[in-house]
């Protein structure tokens, strides 16, 4: 009799576990962090993103809030650089952000010594670029 009962009710446990797991996985994706839940300091730093905050992926929001939490511990130079980077990121189109993420992913796979060489090359190219040219409107980059 117990074998019949186990077979009849045995499917409920795996199904319940799957539903629970699915609920845990989908919850963070469905609920974006509310801008008003950020601290005033986070809102001030992330202000360039305020208009588009709700359209950012939850993972991107979490990344930016993590950056904002670490911000006070940075040197003044790094703080200024970070503020500029956030403003630049906010001005990019979704397609430009996607391409930037792809480039970052590819760059992170390059060995450290080669990354430094690439960084130097990019810095040299930027220093030779016309200072009046806006980097965000420079046109498509070669792939």
Image: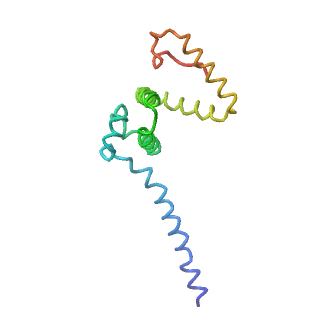
Q: How many numbered discs, if any? A: 0
Q: Position of residue 41 (x, y in %)?
A: 33, 40
Q: Farthest residue to the bottom: give it.
A: 1
Q: Quadrant of the N terminus?
A: bottom right
Q: Position of residue 118 (x, y in %)?
A: 64, 23
Which residue is located at x 38 percent, y 47 percent?
32
Locate residue 46: give its quadrant. Answer: top left
Which residue is located at x 52 percent, y 68 percent?
17
Q: Quadrant of the C terminus?
A: top right
Residue 92 seen in render: no
Locate residue 39: give its quadrant. Answer: top left
Looking at the picture, does residue 137 appear above or below residue 109?
Answer: above
Report the front residue among 113 and 51.
Answer: 113
Looking at the picture, does residue 82 appear above or below residue 21?
Answer: above
Report the front residue among 93 and 106.
Answer: 106
Report the front residue among 109 and 127.
Answer: 127
Residue 135 seen in render: yes
Q: Position of residue 86 (x, y in %)?
A: 43, 31
Looking at the picture, does residue 121 appear above or below residue 18?
Answer: above
Q: Position of residue 21 (x, y in %)?
A: 51, 62
Which residue is located at x 43 percent, y 38 percent?
71
The colouring scheme, among rainbow, by chain, secondary structure or one colour, is rainbow
Locate residue 2: give its quadrant. Answer: bottom right
């Amino acid at each position: 009799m117990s074998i019949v009962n186990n077979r009849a009710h045995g499917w409920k446990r795996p199904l319940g576990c799957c539903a629970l797991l699915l609920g845990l996985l989908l919850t963070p994706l469905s609920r974006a962090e509310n801008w008003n839940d950020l601290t005033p300091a986070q809102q001030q730093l992330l202000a360039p993103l305020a208009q588009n905050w709700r359209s950012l992926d939850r993972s991107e929001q979490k990344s930016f809030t993590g950056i904002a939490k670490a911000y006070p511990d940075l040197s003044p130079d790094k703080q200024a650089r970070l503020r500029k980077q956030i403003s630049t990121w906010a001005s990019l189109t979704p397609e430009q952000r996607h391409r930037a993420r792809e480039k970052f992913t590819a760059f992170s796979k390059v060995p450290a010594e080669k990354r430094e060489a690439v960084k130097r090359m990019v810095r040299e190219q930027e220093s030779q670029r016309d200072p009046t040219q806006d980097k965000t409107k420079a046109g498509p980059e070669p792939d």
